[in-house]
Image (cartoon, rainbow, N blue to C red):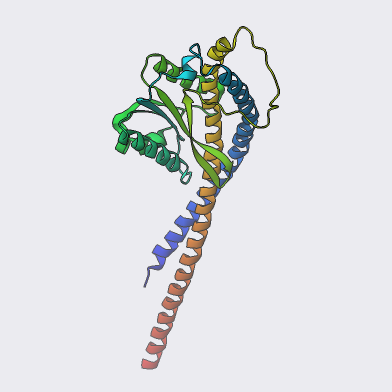
Amino acid sequence: MPNLKDLKNRIASVKNTRKITKAMQMVAAAKLRRAQEAAEMSRPYTERFNAVMASLAASVGGSDSAPKLLSGTGKEDVHLLLVMTSEKGLCGGFNSNIAKKARAHAQELIAAGKEVKILTVGKKGRDQLKRDLGKYFVGHVDLTEVKRIGYVDAQGIAKDILGRFDEGEFDVATLFYAEFVNVVTQIPTALQIIPAKFEATTGDAPDTLFDYEPSEEAILADLLPRGVATAIFSALLENGASEQGARMSAMDNATRNAGDMIDDLTIVYNRSRQAVITNELIEIISGAEAL
């Protein structure tokens, strides 16, 4: 028969856990609203920027004067994977899903004889990938002290990547993050940022003509580095919303599971207590009959 004191302690412990998970759920919900607004506000700018860049890239992409960030190095031998996850856990499969996609891509490249280099943003992704891909790590960006992601953070990461590209350290750079859809859905996404790829959106008027000064090549050379920073900033915002959505969902599930466990333990406790009382009554009655 289970010990009543132990059952009572377990019920109290689970109740305390439920209070914590409920509080974390509420905090995540509050943070989610801000993060979701930031991610959604950045999308129109990113889409319009990409539309203009797609138009420019279509005009000069095949010319010899095209910027290196657009045309590439002419090789695809060395790949840099920029894997962006969170600094904290307790957010369901958010970090694991991004790390899984990055790991699969890295293993596919390695199997094809390519050289892989990994740059991580967020310690959770770093911790998951370093177990089997640690020898490919070339750097880590720590955003632990950053309370609110800003464009300056993306610029710092972009400056590091662009510097590595200028030094010839890699040929292709791919960004891994989670695209926010809603609280229960975050899509792990891989986006090639070097050489830049831009897709024209169908919402733009197809007959619109632009005149560029000083030249399309010069404008591209100036905008492409900003495009890398913009892509990274957009991914950081998407990741922020995805993280809070995943944490809110995970803590909601944990709170519900704690409630179910409390109900089950309470039933066991009441049955055990009833059995103890019954045994005591039997002993009293037996003693009275013996007298």
Residue 136 or residue 91, whichever sits in front: 136
The image quadrant of residue 167 is top left
User: Is 4 drawn above or below residue 187 in the view shown?
Assistant: below
Is residue 205 shown to the viewer in this render? yes
The image quadrant of residue 7 is bottom left
Residue 123 or residue 52, whichever sits in front: 52
**Residue 188 located left or right of residue 204:** left
**Residue 78 at x, y percent in the picture:** 35, 25
* Residue at the (48%, 66%) spot, across then down: 264
Quadrant, the N terminus: bottom left
Residue 181 or residue 199, whichever sits in front: 199
Is residue 291 shown to the viewer in this render? no
Quadrant, the C terminus: bottom left
Find the residue positioned furthest to the top.
Answer: 214
**Residue 109 at x, y percent in the picture:** 35, 33
**Residue 250 at x, y percent in the picture:** 51, 48
* Residue at the (39%, 93%) spot, across then down: 289
Q: How many marks?
A: 0
**Residue 74 at x, y percent in the picture:** 40, 19
The image quadrant of residue 60 is top right
User: Is 166 drawn above or below residue 191 in the view shown?
Assistant: above
